[in-house]
């Protein structure tokens, strides 16, 4: 393992995705390692927003059908463009709503507790919003969230053993609901295996792919996943709070959406204004409200970059970046005494998502000290510094510099000048 800056430069020269960096606006200093929380703006996404504003300016209401990409079909069109990223036939994907509300819409459809089969299996390390949604859906069905939500625990506080998830499934399981990647440690689950396990015991499987969409290839159709949701503002760079996405396996087409709204109508009939709901024949049926055209517009630009670069090349570089980061942290002695920072992310490439979790009691202060130097990571309680080098806009030289900053901060005790409390938005 070479630890010199020249080696980072060599890796950058050999990088087939290097040219994409110039398509993005990097914040001052350019050391942005938080693209797993909020992806950066690309010139393509910016152009798509400006185009949309121009359409609104010049077309008014006529934009619904008269814009070059008619707004009326925007959710379906963006779903089609997203489909290759999740390995799905296009009509199973739609861009709509937001992550947690989409999860609610999916659970309201697919969580049908009957007889003994009323439990939802999830993990104790899930993103809190997903757990809040699960408990409230159980309560809405008259169930007991304490009894009906089974949270598979973690032995090490960072990862969840798939064997334990599978062992938790039985004839009382209605749904296995999992994140593809745990948001804190970055553990990637074997989704093909877990899908088979859920189906073997007669349960459905739903996935939250917020931390894998745009950084890891998926094969939903081949695996047979039942339903999924994700946000588009992390690795897909759709902007803060940007419109999200969902997937419905075609074997479930024709089911009545649990939370119906007119935007889920059969498009040809929607403006009949009939009092009965005539649902779209595909995933489009799970839309509820008018698409937020301005919040979906950036995705149109952003997805063109993903189509050009290809998700396989993005995954390959992402693994090289995170692997290089872990190697450098170790080579600089940071993972052994006296530094003793711990790597919480699995080393195994088949188990690793798109970011690296570095654990230490000083994490909140280290994050502040990094930001004071113009380096942007994020912090997750209790002790995790998350660092996400992004294939489309982070260079190997950036990763090298990050590690130099980190080591200098610790050696100089710079973090000791900061309060131990995390910021309001960390
Ligand atoms: C980011 C993220 C969310 C965010 O939910 P919103 O409804 O978009 O605020 C939900 N779940 C997971 C797993 C996430 O990573």
Image (cartoon, rainbow, N blue to C red):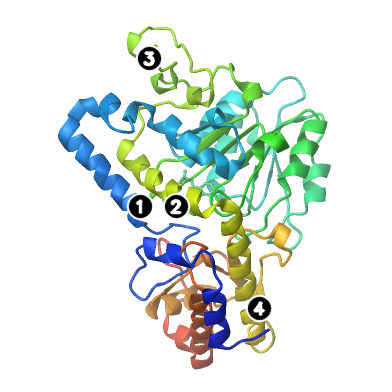
Mark 3 CB lies closer than 8 A to ligand 1: no
Mark 2 CB lies closer than 8 A to ligand 1: no
**Residue designated by label 2:** 305
Q: Secondary structure at mark 1?
A: helix
CA gap, disc 3 to disc 1?
32 Å
**Residue designated by label 3:** 270
Relative image position of residue 127 (x, y in whole percent): 57, 50
Query: Seen in the image, is 266 located left or right of residue 256?
Result: left
CA gap, disc 4 to disc 3?
56 Å
CA gap, disc 1 to disc 2?
8 Å
In the image, which is nearer the foreground, mark 3 or mark 1? 1
Q: Is residue 293 above or below residue 409?
A: above
CA gap, disc 4 to disc 1?
33 Å
Q: Secondary structure at mark 4?
A: helix
Circles 1 and 2: CB atoms closer than 8 Å: yes
Mark earlier in primary sequence (4, 3)? 3
Q: Which numbered tag is attached to residue 44?
A: 1
Instruction: Name the residue: 59% across, 42% down.
Output: 86
* Any part of residue 341 in sight: yes
Mark earlier in primary sequence (1, 2)? 1
In the image, which is nearer the foreground, mark 4 or mark 1? 1
């Amino acid at each position: 393992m070479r630890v010199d800056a020249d080696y980072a430069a060599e890796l950058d020269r050999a990088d087939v995705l290097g040219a994409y960096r110039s398509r993005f606006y990097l914040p001052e200093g350019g050391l942005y390692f938080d693209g797993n929380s909020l992806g950066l703006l690309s010139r393509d996404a910016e152009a798509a927003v400006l185009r949309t504003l121009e359409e609104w300016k010049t077309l008014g209401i006529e934009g619904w059908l008269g814009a070059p990409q008619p707004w009326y079909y925007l959710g379906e069109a963006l779903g089609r463009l997203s489909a290759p990223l999740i390995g799905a036939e296009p009509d199973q994907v739609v861009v709509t709503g937001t992550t947690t509300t989409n999860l609610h819409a999916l659970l309201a459809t697919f969580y049908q507790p009957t007889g003994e089969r009323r439990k939802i299996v999830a993990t104790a390390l899930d993103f809190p919003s997903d757990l809040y949604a699960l408990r409230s859906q159980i309560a809405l069905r008259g169930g007991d969230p304490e009894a009906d939500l089974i949270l598979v625990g973690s032995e090490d506080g960072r990862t969840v053993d798939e064997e334990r998830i599978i062992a938790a499934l039985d004839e009382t399981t209605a749904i296995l609901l999992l994140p593809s990647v745990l948001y804190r440690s970055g553990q990637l689950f074997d989704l093909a295996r877990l899908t088979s396990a859920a189906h073997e015991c007669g349960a459905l499987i739903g996935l939250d792919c917020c931390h894998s969409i745009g950084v890891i290839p998926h094969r939903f159709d081949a695996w047979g996943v039942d339903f999924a949701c994700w946000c588009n503002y992390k690795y897909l760079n759709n902007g803060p709070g940007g419109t999200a996405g969902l997937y419905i396996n075609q074997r479930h087409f024709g089911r009545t959406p649990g939370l119906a709204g007119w935007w889920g109508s059969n498009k040809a009939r929607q403006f009949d204004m009939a009092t009965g709901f005539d649902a779209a024949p595909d995933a489009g049926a799970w839309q509820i409200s008018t698409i937020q055209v301005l919040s979906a517009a950036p995705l149109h630009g952003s997805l063109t970059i993903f189509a050009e670069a290809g998700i396989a090349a993005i995954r390959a570089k992402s693994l090289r970046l995170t692997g290089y980061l872990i190697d450098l942290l170790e080579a600089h002695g940071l993972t052994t005494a006296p530094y003793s920072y711990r790597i919480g992310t699995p080393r195994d490439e088949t188990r690793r998502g798109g970011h690296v979790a570095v654990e230490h009691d000083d994490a909140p202060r280290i994050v502040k000290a990094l930001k004071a130097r113009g380096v942007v990571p994020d912090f997750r309680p209790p002790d995790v510094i998350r660092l996400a080098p992004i294939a489309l806009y982070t260079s190997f030289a950036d990763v090298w510099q990050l590690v130099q900053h980190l080591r200098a901060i610790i050696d100089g005790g710079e973090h000791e000048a900061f309060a131990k409390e995390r910021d309001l938005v960390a």
